[in-house]
Image (cartoon, grey):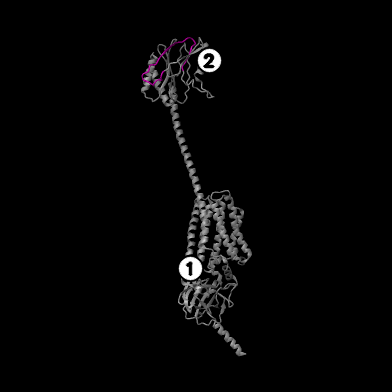
């Protein structure tokens, strides 16, 4: 019996020692494929300051007593039976296909904490500083940074990894449990290269060195897209914030500027998240920051929608803001809640609210064909649907968590471009409206200025005309001649400030009364000038007994004055006793009322006005007046006068009115 037991123990020892090594073939690495070493059977030994021995990397070291793991992940669901205290050694035996002998291969690793990689007892790569205490450890996540190796065909190789993760040294309680639970969430996995899938352990795969280098360069280059988006969104955000600074009444610029800046900051978080070498704590802090920025972007986007389309911010929006503000502390404090169905509903409510609000808020402007509403509506709908889809996939642990950076960038840039086009269009329309208003103001100002100029000019002319009118009136006789056998009446009303009508008297030494009634062509200052000249000439020539001689002298003198189209029509009579001499130059006929017959005679003498020709023969008529006869000298202003109904008096009516007036006045004479 003792011999049988010894044989069994010897067989078990030989079996453990003879455990076959993993063979790596060339086919497994063709076409860019990799071998996931982290899913193979590794030997594991928890280490500490007391039992952390460099000989564990020696390929000849006997690791038969170590625990065999089914992979290198150390999570709440896969804690090694031998325990985990933050530091451990992992060993894996490998063999290579002769076709891969001495070819350049690479180990691609991801992990929190720090690690040292040994191949056949030689240090190949060190990521950070492995430590048995948090103070001694220097964290460095390789984040798929390749470590080049070469395997010869001499036989078995031993890959040893010394790994520490002090953040998760105790995953049963407290901070360690919180970190491992949070880091295991799928929303973190999407942008941490699946580092969280390994918890306190590590992930490692074997790939052809050139392929590993190309993949790493591609990932770094794709990260440049985050930086490009960051610069573009930040520039747009700052531009709109400056527009709000200089034009505070346009609050849409404020909210969209905050949205663009939040999206820009989110790109930096994604960049550091996916390409940096941070610890689990750093990744989780960035996760919280990114969630905050995402909710901030959604909130400011909704606020932009409300203000851009003149809608008051509804009360329930502030309820959503409160719920979104509570998301981060609740998510951080109540770790267990994040793994329940109710927490999924909470997140869905936050995201679906934004989608429903976008549909509700944009439906009215689009239906009413608001300017640019369809542009903003398209951009906001695409963005909110994308955010909702991503969150639902991540929260529900569905496939597709590795959303393309390009897709996300296109969605954000599409929205930013749509809103920027809308705001630029709105700004341009406002400017055009202001320019139109300025043009109108300038036109009104110019019109007002011109009006003031015209008014000033009119006032000046009115003053001049008033002076001229006063001068003209001063040239009229101050009183009528007082003769015992005559009654004389005179009336004049000019059609403008300074008219061309004129009358005058001259009483000779022999008792001859000379009467002149004139009408200068035109009105205004020129007509006044003609009247002034005629007045002077009349005073000089009225003594002469021959009326045609007086007219010839007047006409010749006025012609020489070269008044350019101005003439003086005139009727002049001389009365001596009962003998009346009449001479007419372009004036209406003289009316004579004969009291004896109660009839009106017309004396018509056709002749050109004075000043028309230098040599013209004017005619003179002689009449004898009887007692109570009445003589009317008039200008054309009397028969051409209009009444209130717009009817002209005309010559026939003037003649009848004169007859009636003269008949009434005659008996009293």
Residue 415 position within the rendered picture, expressed as x and y whole percent measured from the top left = 53, 56
Q: Which contiguous range is marked in magenta?
A: 607-633
Residue nearer the viewer, 188 or 507: 188
Q: The residue tagged with tag 2: helix, strand or loop?
A: helix
Q: Which residue was labeled with disc 2? A: 660
Q: Is residue 531 above or below residue 349?
A: above
Residue 611 position within the rendered picture, expressed as x and y whole percent measured from the top left = 39, 21
10 Å neighbourhood of mark 2: few (<14), some, or many (≥20)?
some
Determine the residue located farthest toward the right in the rendered image.
Answer: 342
Residue 524 position within the rendered picture, expressed as x and y whole percent measured from the top left = 43, 26
Question: Cα distance, mark 2 to mark 1?
Answer: 124 Å
Q: The residue tagged with tag 1: helix, strand or loop?
A: helix
Q: Is residue 121 above or below residue 586?
A: below
Residue 615 in magenta?
Answer: yes
Please identify the dominant SS of the magenta region: loop
Q: Is residue 136 visible?
A: no
Q: Which residue was labeled with disc 1? A: 215
State which quadrant residue 348 falls in: bottom right
Residue 436 in magenta?
Answer: no
Circle number at residue 621 = none
């Amino acid at each position: 019996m003792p011999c049988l037991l010894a044989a069994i123990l010897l067989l078990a020892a030989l079996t453990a020692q003879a455990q076959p090594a993993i063979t790596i073939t060339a086919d497994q690495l063709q076409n860019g494929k990799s071998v996931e070493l982290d899913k193979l059977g590794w030997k594991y030994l928890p280490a500490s300051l007391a039992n952390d021995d460099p000989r564990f990397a020696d390929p000849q070291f006997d690791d038969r007593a170590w625990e065999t793991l089914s992979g290198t992940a150390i999570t709440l669901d896969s804690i090694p039976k031998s325990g985990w205290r933050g530091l451990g050694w992992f060993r894996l035996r490998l063999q290579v296909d002769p076709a891969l002998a001495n070819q350049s291969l690479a180990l691609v690793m991801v992990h929190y904490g720090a690690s040292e990689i040994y191949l056949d007892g030689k240090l190949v790569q060190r990521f950070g500083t492995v430590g048995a205490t948090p103070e001694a450890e220097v964290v460095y996540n390789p984040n798929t940074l390749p470590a080049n190796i070469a395997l010869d065909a001499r036989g078995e190789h031993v890959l040893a990894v010394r790994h520490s993760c002090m953040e998760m040294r105790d995953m049963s309680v407290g901070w360690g449990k919180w970190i491992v639970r949070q880091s295991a969430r799928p929303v973190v996995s999407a942008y941490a290269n699946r580092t969280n899938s390994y918890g306190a352990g590590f992930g490692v795969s074997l790939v052809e060195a050139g392929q590993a280098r190309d993949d790493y360069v591609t990932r770094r280059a794709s990260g440049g897209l985050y930086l490009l988006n960051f610069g573009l969104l930040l520039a747009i955000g700052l531009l709109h914030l400056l527009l709000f600074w200089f034009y505070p009444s346009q609050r849409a610029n404020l909210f969209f500027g905050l949205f663009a800046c939040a999206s820009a900051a989110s790109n930096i978080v994604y960049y550091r998240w996916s390409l940096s070498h941070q610890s689990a704590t750093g990744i989780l802090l960035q996760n919280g920051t990114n969630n905050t920025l995402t909710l901030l972007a959604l909130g400011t986007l909704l606020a932009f929608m409300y203000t851009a389309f003149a809608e008051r911010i509804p009360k329930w929006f502030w309820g959503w803001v409160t719920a979104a503000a509570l998301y981060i502390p609740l998510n951080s404090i109540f770790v267990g809640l994040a793994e329940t169905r109710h927490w999924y509903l909470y997140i869905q409510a936050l995201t679906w609210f934004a989608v429903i609000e976008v549909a509700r808020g944009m439906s009215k402007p689009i239906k009413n064909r608001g300017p640019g509403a369809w542009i903003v509506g398209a951009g906001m709908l695409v963005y909110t649907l994308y955010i909702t889809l991503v969150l639902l996939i991540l929260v529900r642990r569905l496939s597709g968590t590795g959303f393309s950076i390009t897709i996300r960038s296109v969605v954000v840039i599409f929205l930013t471009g749509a809103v920027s086009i809308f705001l630029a269009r709105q700004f341009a329309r406002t400017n055009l409206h202001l320019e139109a208003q300025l043009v109108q103001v300038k036109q009104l100002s110019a019109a007002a200025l011109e009006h003031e100029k015209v008014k000033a000019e009119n006032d000046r002319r009115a003053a001049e005309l008033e002076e001229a009118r006063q001068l003209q009136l001063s040239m009229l006789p101050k009183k009528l001649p007082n003769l015992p056998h005559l009654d004389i009446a005179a009336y004049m009303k000019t059609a403008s400030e300074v008219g061309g009508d004129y009358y005058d008297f001259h009483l000779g030494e022999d008792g001859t009364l000379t009467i002149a009634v004139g009408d200068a062509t035109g009105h205004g200052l020129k007509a006044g000038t003609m009247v002034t000249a005629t007045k002077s000439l009349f005073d000089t020539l009225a003594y002469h007994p021959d009326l045609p001689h007086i007219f010839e002298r007047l006409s010749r003198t006025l012609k020489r004055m070269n008044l350019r189209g101005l003439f003086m029509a005139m009727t002049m009579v001389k009365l001596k006793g009962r003998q009346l001499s009449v001479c007419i130059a372009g004036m209406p006929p003289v009316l004579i009322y004969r009291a004896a017959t109660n009839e009106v005679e017309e004396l018509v003498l056709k002749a050109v006005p004075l000043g028309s020709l230098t040599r013209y023969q004017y005619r003179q008529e002689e009449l004898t007046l009887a007692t109570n006869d009445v003589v009317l000298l008039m200008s054309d202003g009397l028969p051409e006068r209009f009444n209130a109904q717009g009817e002209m008096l005309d010559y026939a009516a003037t003649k009848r009115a004169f007859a009636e007036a003269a008949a009434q006045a005659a008996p009293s004479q």
